[in-house]
Each structure stands twice: as C-alpha cells, then as structure tokens.
C-alpha cells in the first residue's frame, strides 16, 4: 500500500540562514503511530510544519495521501489534523463554537453528531457552553485536540501533546490516540518523554540537527534495549584479549582493568556461564562484577551523541 505521507529530501533553511532540516526522507504508513524524538531545536516542529504546509520548505517534497503539499495544498491539508505545541484559541468563543468553526474552515457541512462525539471523547461535553478563557490549561489543550479532529482527518499530528499536562489527562490522551488508531487514523507525535514513545509508538524516529538519524520499528529498538552489559573488574590489568575469547562480544576498558560483555536478555542462553569458564581457563581472574540494562534512553543519547560527532567531523573536514 502507498504510504499516507511521503517525504523526499526535505530541507528548510530559515531566512536568517539557519538550516533546521537537512535532507529528510521518510515514508509514513497509514494507521501507524510514529513518535519523533529529538533534543530541543532538533527540527521536529519544523518538520511537522513543512508537512502541514505552514512553513515552506527550501527543497524537497512532501505528499499527503498522494497530494503534493505545495501544488495541491488544499487536498493535502484537508487530510491533516494538527495539534500545535502552543495553545492559541479565541478566548471569548465557546468551546463548541470553536470546534464547529474549525470544521467549517475545511469547507465541510455541519455535523453536530461528530462534534458531540469528539467533545465527549475529550470530556469537554459538559464544558461546551463555556468560553475558552474559563477553561483550565489542560482543558484548553483538549480543545486544541477537538479542533484538530473536527474535520475527521486521516492523519493527526500531535506536537508535544503531553508537555505540562497532569497524569490523568496524559492517560486520557493516550486512550484517545489508541482509539483513533483503531479507527485507522495515522498519528505522528513528538515528545520528550521517551517512556511515552516506548509505550505508544509503532515506530520511532530520532531527529537531531535537522537530520533523521534513525527510523525503526519499536520492536527492533526494544531488541537493542534488551541488551544487557556485564562488566567484570579484573584482578590484574589485561594488555590484550586472548584469542580464545575472540568469539565473545567483549570490550576491554582503556586501562585494561575491566571487560564488558554484551548479551541479549531474551536469548535462550546468555553465554555467561561459558564465558566465565573460558576466562578461568585463560587464567583471567576478576574481583567484582556488575550488570546493567540499556534503555531506549541510552539508545537515543548514543545516537544523538554520534550524530553530533559526525556533524562536527563533517564541519572540520
Ligand atoms: N521562524 C524561525 N526562524 C529562524 N529559525 C527558526 C525558526 N523556527 C525555528 N527555528 C530554528 O530551527 C531549529 C529547529 O527548531 P524546531 O522548533 O523545529 O525544533 P524542535 O525539535 O521542535 O525543538 P523543541 O523540542 O525545542 O520544540 C532551532 O534551532 C530553531 O531556533
């Protein structure tokens, strides 16, 4: 099946000369939840804004549902619901009218039943006659989501939807995201909460300095996370790894005082028993050991760190 969003070689250089996107290519499949992770200033909002045609790219192309966002803007935009990071709603308008108005902006006929469904799903039905200015911060965020869903989009963008919201609202939001996905809506979210991406996403993309460093199925990343490290602090420093241990995924510390063995926690055999026997046979004794589980956060930090180093090297070359 053709991807619902197809991004090719997208670049964005802002007027001041800053390059916020640097050759991003990505296909997003219909019905998936994609989480975009990246540090502050990585380019996540710029990417979303280019896909939603709020920011004009400097190069490359984006198609949504087969419609080019530049040459076929209206058709592309009508498929998209966007929940922006910043809360911006008309303070004196009522909740219900705000959401109805949003639907009208897309040229769709009124559909009170749909508006009611959306407001109920977001626990806003009881507040429908309140003015936006009378709502709490969390409720205003819900109104933004209701607006984004008012025209029944096939793709929903959530730009840091849970930044600064309480646990209950966060849970509600994720329930809603799950039910939308069940209806076939494609969801792209940015978040700083790695656990959230871990829980919700089908695929995870890591972006830094305007470059997409990785896009991977969560299950594949989880496999990487399933890695554990066993560090052996040796009784005496080791100058070189003996050839008898060459088959193990072993790293010698710089000072030769420690050996680190990486293994998959879900593999049938970890290989630790055999390793310890082979170490003893090679005459290598250890005085202490520790184990450590790598997390998605480790994977993320390593990628961002490696990305930063390769960018510095490119700059120096
Ligand atoms: N209108 C603009 N003019 C100039 N530079 C901009 C503009 N908007 C964003 N930038 C710059 O582009 C880079 C990427 O910004 P962007 O908002 O896309 O990052 P982000 O990944 O969404 O960050 P955060 O996690 O902090 O929201 C930043 O260095 C930012 O300062």
Image (cartoon, rainbow, N blue to C red):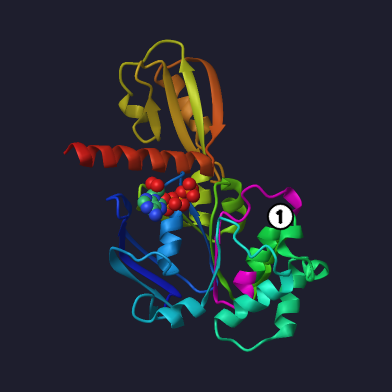
Q: Which residues are magenta?
A: 147-171
Please name whichever residue, 191 or 128, is drawn nearer the observer in this view of the structure: 128
Q: Which quadrant of the structure image shows residue 99?
A: bottom right
Find residue 209 and report its horizontal and vertical position in percent.
Answer: 35, 47
Q: Residue furthest bottom?
A: 109
Q: Is residue 43 visible?
A: no
Q: Position of residue 97 (x, y in %)?
A: 70, 75
Question: Where is 211 relative to 314, above or below?
Answer: below
Q: Is residue 58 left or right of residue 172?
A: left
The single residue placed furthest to the front in the displayed view is 92
> Residue 73's image quarter?
bottom left
Outermost left residue? 317
Residue sitting at x 71%, y 63% = 132
Classify mark 1: residues with Cα within 10 Å, few (<14), some (14-19) or many (20+): some
- Which quarter of the rendered picture does the C terminus lie within? top left
Whether residue 14 is in magenta: the answer is: no
What residue did someone put label 1 on? 138
Is residue 153 placed above or below 124 in the rendered structure?
below
Q: Residue at x 28, y 42 (%)?
A: 311
- Nearer to the camera, 171 or 195: 171
> Position of 125 compared to 316: left or right?
right
Question: Which residue is more in the foreground, 108 or 152?
Answer: 108
């Amino acid at each position: 099946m053709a991807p619902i969003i197809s991004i090719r070689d997208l670049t964005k250089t802002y007027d001041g000369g800053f390059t916020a996107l640097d050759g991003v290519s990505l296909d997003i499949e219909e019905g998936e939840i994609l989480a975009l992770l990246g540090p502050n200033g990585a380019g996540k909002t710029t990417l979303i804004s280019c896909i939603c045609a709020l920011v004009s790219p400097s190069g490359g192309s984006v198609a949504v549902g087969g419609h080019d966002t530049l040459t076929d803007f209206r058709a592309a935009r009508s498929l998209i619901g966007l929940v922006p990071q910043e809360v911006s709603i008309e303070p004196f308008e009522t909740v219900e009218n705000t959401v109805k108005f949003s639907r009208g902006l897309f040229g769709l006929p009124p559909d009170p039943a749909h508006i009611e469904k959306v407001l109920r799903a977001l626990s806003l039905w009881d507040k429908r006659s309140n003015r936006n200015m009378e709502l709490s911060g969390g409720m205003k965020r819900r109104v933004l989501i209701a607006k984004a869903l008012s025209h029944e989009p096939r793709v929903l963008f959530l730009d840091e939807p849970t930044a600064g919201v309480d646990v209950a609202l966060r849970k509600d939001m994720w329930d809603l995201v799950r039910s939308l996905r069940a209806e076939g809506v494609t969801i792209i979210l940015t978040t700083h909460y790695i656990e959230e991406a871990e829980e919700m996403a089908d695929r995870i993309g890591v972006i830094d300095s305007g470059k997409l460093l990785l896009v991977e199925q969560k299950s594949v990343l989880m496999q990487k996370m399933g890695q554990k490290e066993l560090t052996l602090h040796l009784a005496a420093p080791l100058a070189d790894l003996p050839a008898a241990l060459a088959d193990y995924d072993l790293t010698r510390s710089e000072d030769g005082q420690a050996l680190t063995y990486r293994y998959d926690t879900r593999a049938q055999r970890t290989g630790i028993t055999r390793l310890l026997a082979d170490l003893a046979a090679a005459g290598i004794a250890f005085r202490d050991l520790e184990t450590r589980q790598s997390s998605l956060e480790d994977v993320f930090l390593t990628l961002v760190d490696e990305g930063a180093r390769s960018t510095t090297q490119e700059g120096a070359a």
